[in-house]
Image (cartoon, rainbow, N blue to C red):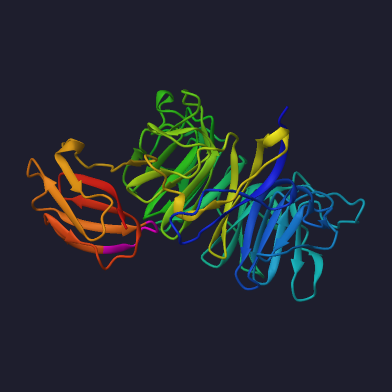
Amino acid sequence: MPKKIHILFLLTFFAPITQAQNWLQMNVNGDAKCFDVDTVANVLFVAGDMTSLGSKNTANGIGIWDGINWDTLPNKLNIPPWSMCHYKNKLYVTGSFYEQPFNCPSKSLMVWDFTTLKWDTVGIGLWNGGSDGGIAKMERINNELYFFGIFDSVFNCKVNNLAKFDGVNWTAINFPYSSLINDIAMYKGELYAYGQFWNLGGNPNMDCVVKYNGTNWVPAGANFEGAHSIEAMTVYKNELYVAGYFLKADGCPGDNITKYDGTSWQEVNGGFSLYGFADAIPRHMEVYNDILYITGNFDKMGTMPTKSIVTYDGTQFCAVDNSIDQCAGPIAVYKNEIYVGGTWFASGTNYQDTVFFMGRQNKFGVDTCQTFAVGVKENYRAENIKVYPNPTTSILNIIDEQNQFQNATINIANYLGQIVFTSSFTSQIDLQNLSAGMYFLTIENKDSKKTIKIIKE
């Protein structure tokens, strides 16, 4: 029988297009649940239900990866943290700690000081209901550290589940409800929050996702009343993306993913699904090099097969690796590499566990990309645009059979999303100055848009 393994995966980016897709095991015994990158010390912190990392044992579930070797922090916490965040040369960690066996002085909030190289408390910790037992996660926003979860006081400051910290002073954010906050994001100067709450303050429009306008918490402009859960929220290309388990059939603005431009909410490419059903759950989102990475438990985005990991460049969704059969977890960018955590299954030859390493250049495999453009009138048929020869060594011919794109603009982007060529519409393009590799040619006018994958040899 296949053996269940807990692993931390690494997705590394190489230049040669011919490199095969593979995954590399990180020798982690346990489930990596959160990452944090220290850009000053240039190390990656990993936390989760882990007992060893490489040759290092850990009792607190925190590892330090420098790109080559693992290290750990001294034992002080007695269970892995729920959340961690590097801020002003200190590593803040939250969890449900208890005193034994390492005499942890706080049950909810501790900090590792990189100056003194010691664990320390942060005031009285996060309190809830008269005891040191608050629950919180953290997010760095505008050089301040935000704490959110379920707690009613911190450092003698009365709060309701949301506060910010500048390294010295705490400030309560006016969240007048006792409901759990799962995550936050700053979008167009307003703070958005989501959680498992409905009808806040008796307002039927205050369901799951709300925003703070600087004075009051108000509806976010969408109906999430039927949402089962919201799992992730991030800002990408000046739009707010929300992902989780929610369905259009229940009145939500999309199937498991939606986006907001400040005026209206829109569904995204038909949403995620799993085994032919809509109950898929995207759980994590990360933006890197102007590309949005999404991980979770799904096997299809729209009509495109994609298991557990998908990328989006604002126009196209692309599958990363369709060999993954289990839910992918948190992701992080460190030293130009993408790290993915999770609990996956593998059997391998003679039922030996196997994990593989994937090269970045192959993340756009054949027929694994799907074009998506909100608000663009797709009134052309794909066969009406012909591009040849493809692959090409230099000259690329473009035939617009129905003259739909004669006033269009042509852009060519590399796999990082960087524009390497632009011009008004022309029937012939010379690509001899481009390096060999994969590119995306986009032809767009006010009515239509077409993106075609091309190969320069």
**Foreground: 207 or 308?**
308
User: Residue at point 38% right, 56% down?
Assistant: 415
**Picture coordinates of residue 94, whole percent (x, y):** 72, 53
User: Residue at point 66% right, 35% down?
Assistant: 345
**Foreground: 59 or 310?**
310
**Foreground: 45 or 16?**
16
Q: Going by the image, does 32 lie left or right of 414? A: right
Q: Going by the image, does 395 lie left or right of 455? A: left
Task: Look at the image and say whether residue 434 sits in the magenta stretch.
Answer: no
**Foreground: 390 or 41?**
390
| Range of magenta residues | 415-420
User: Residue at point 37% right, 33% down?
Assistant: 270
Q: Is residue 197 above or below residue 115?
A: above
Q: Is residue 56 above or below residue 176?
A: below
**Picture coordinates of residue 132, whole percent (x, y):** 79, 50
User: Residue at point 66% right, 72% down?
Assistant: 41
